[in-house]
Amino acid sequence: MKRRIVRALTIVFAFAAVTFLLTSLGPQVHAQQGCADFRALAQLVLPSEHPLSDTDSWGGAVWGTLGSEFLTGYMTGNDGNVASHKNSNQATNGQYVFTFVGGDTFTVVVERPAVFNFPVGKAGFGQYKGHATIVAGTGKFQYASGSIYWEAPFIVWTPDGTNYYGRGNETITGTICGVQ
């Protein structure tokens, strides 16, 4: 009789342990499934020729790959809050929307300060470096998560001291998970 009770308790304990592990570790394991490298090139223009909102400043064509899938589309957005220093600027809370052929989109927010330098003696030319996190998506990116990093040489000019124009050639890399 004691053996039956010990066996029954062992089975109940084992079942409880497996159930606990599956429910507690399941979301973590699921979050890492379906990740793919994202690599892209973008040619951005200031001001954006196709802004999605009134606050969008930069925008332009984007071409890339997600794993082995080719993607083409458009990205538009803004640098967010900019703090200027002598030869560099830092921006936080900028938001960009990537829209691809077929209507699939994902939105990123620059949560860490992005830095864009204007080297001494080369006024107007700079180098942008930023890191952003995916915060929303539609279509195949509805459940996407991940982050991207981009850097770009750029030039900005103002012919009248009021209106700004620019061009940038972005190289974008990152990892995106949860794509449908």
Image (cartoon, rainbow, N blue to C red):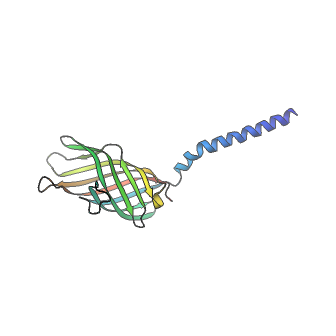
> What residue appears at the point 67 percent right and 43 percent down from the top-left corner?
19
Quarter residue 113 falls in? top left
Q: Is residue 2 above or below residue 103?
A: above
Q: Position of residue 53 (x, y in %)?
A: 31, 57
In this picture, residue 66 sits left or right of residue 166:
right
Residue 139 visible in the picture: yes
Q: Position of residue 180 (x, y in %)?
A: 51, 59
> What residue appears at the point 52 percent right and 49 percent down from the top-left corner?
32
Q: Position of residue 2 (x, y in %)?
A: 86, 32
Relative depth, front residue between 55 and 146:
55
Residue 67 visible in the picture: no
> What residue appears at the point 37 percent right and 58 percent down from the top-left corner?
98
Relative depth, front residue between 174 and 59:
59
The number of numbered badges drawn on the structure is 0
Q: Position of residue 99 (x, y in %)?
A: 38, 61
Which residue in the rendered view is the most extreme toward the top? Answer: 2
> What residue appears at the point 56 percent right and 50 percent down from the top-left corner?
30
Which residue in the rendered view is the most extreme toward the front? Answer: 54
In this picture, residue 32 sits left or right of residue 55:
right
